[in-house]
Amino acid sequence: EKANLALLLDSYKEKLSQFPKEKGWMGQEVFMYQGFWYTSDNAFSIERMMAVQEIFQAHSSDIYVITQPKCGTTWIKALVYAIVNRTKYKNINPSDHPLNISNPHKCVPFLETEIIIKVYMCRNPKDVLVSWFHFANQLKDKSRTSMTIGEMLDVYAKGFMPYGPYWDHVIEYYKASSEEPTKVLFLTYEDTKIDTQSKVKRLAEFLGYPFTEEEVAKGVVEEIVTLCSFENLKEVNKNGDFITGVPNNTFFREGKVGGWSNYLTKEMSQILDDITTEKFQGLDISF
Ligand code: A3P
């Protein structure tokens, strides 16, 4: 099967020369396919995404967690996993809960790397940019110099990031959620931070796993919020690698709203505000 997959991925790689190409984040090439930019030849590559489109069969009971990178993927995966599996792990020692011994990305795999998972989470693009900035510089080859925040802004604003442009992706899922609210739940990182408990209840209802009154009275909602909290997951993931070259701790930096103001100048902030205002015109999205 692995050999077949490798052949399939190679056959997609041959098609890349037909796609628009740009120098994207960290000097890597990004390829435009179906309106979005992708990197090639890695665990989250355009080839793998094309293979998913060809091979993957969705089922009506599947749950998909959808985000742009750096918008809270890790957090929303942990929350969905903890809600859906809470009966299964009800009687185990809390320290044996999968979220207390492994990375949330192992509990809810990426579609490109394995196959699973319609819950959308987005985040203030300014915090997303700053999060990318740190993430990229942490993962870069040692031989490369670090990117400056200005360089990162330039690439990000043009959309030449993995899965960029950020705004177009958010718009697609905002519209999908407006058209089919029972199928796509649209969340923001910021709203989820302000009142995590009420968002967890909403998420559980949406997923078809609502909390009973008894569970609420027993504090099950708070338990899930604590299990999936930034502080807990950061501690659990302080060692080890998610995949080679990607330490578990890279997914947990600061976990705050509005940290961008420490990194972006007024001019940089204005550039992103202008794009956001123009692109999100008429949509009720606020961060
Ligand atoms: P910062 O870099 O601003 O700290 P993703 O998971 O989509 O890659 O997003 C990463 C961002 O989510 C990082 O933001 C990270 O710190 C934050 N994050 C990770 N786990 C979190 C959690 N449990 N609660 C809140 N934020 C979390």
Image (cartoon, rainbow, N blue to C red):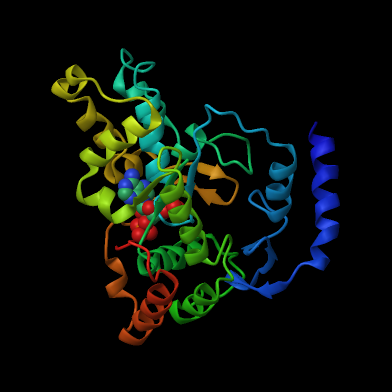
Visible residue check, residue 36: yes
Horizontal placement of 99 versus 141: left or right?
Answer: left
Residue 87, quarter of the rendered image:
top left
Residue for point 27% across, 66% down? 258
Which is more toward the observer, 278 or 99?
278
Looking at the image, the residue that sits furthest to the front is 179
Query: In what quadrant of the picture does the C terminus appear?
Result: bottom left
* Residue at the left extreme, as displayed: 217
Q: Quadrant of the N terminus?
A: top right
Above or below: residue 207 compared with residue 130: above
205 shown above or below 8: above
Q: Place residue 54 in its image quadrant.
A: top right
Q: Is residue 114 left or right of residue 250?
A: right
Q: Position of residue 23 (x, y in %)?
A: 66, 75
Residue sticking out furthest to the bottom? 267
Find the residue positioned furthest to the top: 91
- Residue at image position (39%, 31%) is 207
**Residue 242: x %, y % from top left:** 53, 43
Give 149 or 244, whichever is nearer the viewer.
Answer: 149
Residue at 58%, 66% in the rendered image: 142
- The total of numbered circles placed on residues is 0
In the visual, does 69 lie left or right of 210? right
Give the left or right position of residue 34, taking residue 7 as reference: left
Say whether residue 249 is visible: no
Estimate the x, y position of residue 261 in percent, counting from the top left.
Answer: 28, 74
